[in-house]
Image: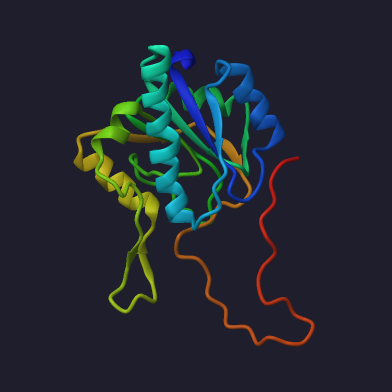
């Protein structure tokens, strides 16, 4: 894969990109091809904004200002750790949309050949142009109390419907890996108990 015609957009909503991951990206992508999106917004809004304001805007700017046609766009969360040989295997996976495997709470997270999760993934530039926004949405039950499909599932469905091949492979570390079903715990609040969880941290 020719990374000289690729860009990477880092998700730094909840902290900086891990140092080892940032070093690998800086070592393998040309100067100016690794950018971080730092706008503090709700997660789903941020995922969509990263594509519009990060991916598509950068593709257009590279073409207009530098005459560079971007072939691939990578997206990486701040809590991802790039590992060897996992990254090499990830880059070798064929497909139009490819996500890097990691540990997930659900044993079935990678069970389907076209499974997709959005912590660390890449796609052909044409994929982002072909899919009508919003690229990521959540699906809810009628009463709005349960999620029946996370943003990963809706993006995958749109990509497949548009005729693109979705695959996964390789391996990376991912600190905050979770399943979209989540947990629901009703906990009484006491005088010395926190009312919300501690913010996520990133970097090493």
Q: Is residue 121 left or right of residue 10?
A: left
x and y percentages locating residue 117 in the rendered image: 44, 45
Q: Is residue 44 left or right of residue 80?
A: left
Q: Residue furthest right?
A: 192
- Location of residue 105 (image quadrant): bottom right
x and y percentages locating residue 144 in the rendered image: 35, 75
User: How many labels sit on residues?
Assistant: 0
Q: Is residue 166 left or right of residue 12?
A: left
Residue closer to the observer: 30 or 116:
30
Residue closer to the observer: 141 or 179:
141
- Quarter holding the N terminus is top left
At 36% from the left edge and 16% from the top edge, which residue is drawn? 69
Q: Can see residue 87?
A: yes
Residue closer to the observer: 196 or 1:
196
At 66% from the left edge and 41% from the top edge, which residue is drawn? 16
- Location of residue 60 (image quadrant): top left
Q: Is the residue 179 above or below the residue 202 in the image?
A: below
Q: Can see residue 110?
A: no
x and y percentages locating residue 22 in the rendered image: 65, 30
Q: How is the image coloured?
A: rainbow
- Location of residue 72 (image quadrant): top left
Residue closer to the observer: 35 or 154:
35
At 63% from the left edge and 18% from the top edge, which residue is drawn? 27
x and y percentages locating residue 89 in the rendered image: 50, 25
- Quarter holding the C terminus is top right
At 50% from the left edge and 66% from the top edge, which residue is drawn? 182
Q: Is the residue 50 above or below the residue 28 in the image?
A: below
């Amino acid at each position: 894969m020719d990374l000289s015609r690729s860009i990477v957009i880092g998700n730094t909503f909840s902290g900086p990109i891990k140092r080892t991951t940032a070093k690998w990206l800086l070592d393998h992508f040309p100067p100016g091809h690794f950018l971080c999106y730092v706008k503090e917004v709700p997660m789903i809004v941020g995922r969509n904004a990263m594509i519009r304001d990060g991916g598509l805007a950068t593709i257009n700017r590279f073409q207009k200002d530098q005459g560079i046609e971007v072939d691939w766009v990578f997206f990486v969360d701040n809590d991802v750790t790039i590992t060897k040989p996992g990254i090499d295997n990830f880059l070798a996976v064929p497909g139009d949309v490819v996500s890097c495997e990691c540990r997930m709470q659900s044993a079935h997270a990678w069970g389907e050949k076209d499974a997709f999760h959005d912590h660390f993934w890449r796609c052909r530039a044409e994929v982002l142009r072909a899919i009508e926004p919003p690229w990521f949405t959540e699906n809810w039950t009628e009463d709005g109390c349960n999620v029946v499909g996370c943003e990963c599932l809706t993006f995958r469905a749109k990509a497949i419907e548009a005729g693109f091949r979705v695959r996964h492979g390789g391996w990376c570390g991912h600190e905050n890996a979770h399943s979209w079903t989540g947990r629901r715990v009703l906990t009484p609040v006491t005088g010395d108990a926190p009312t919300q969880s501690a913010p996520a941290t990133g970097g090493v």
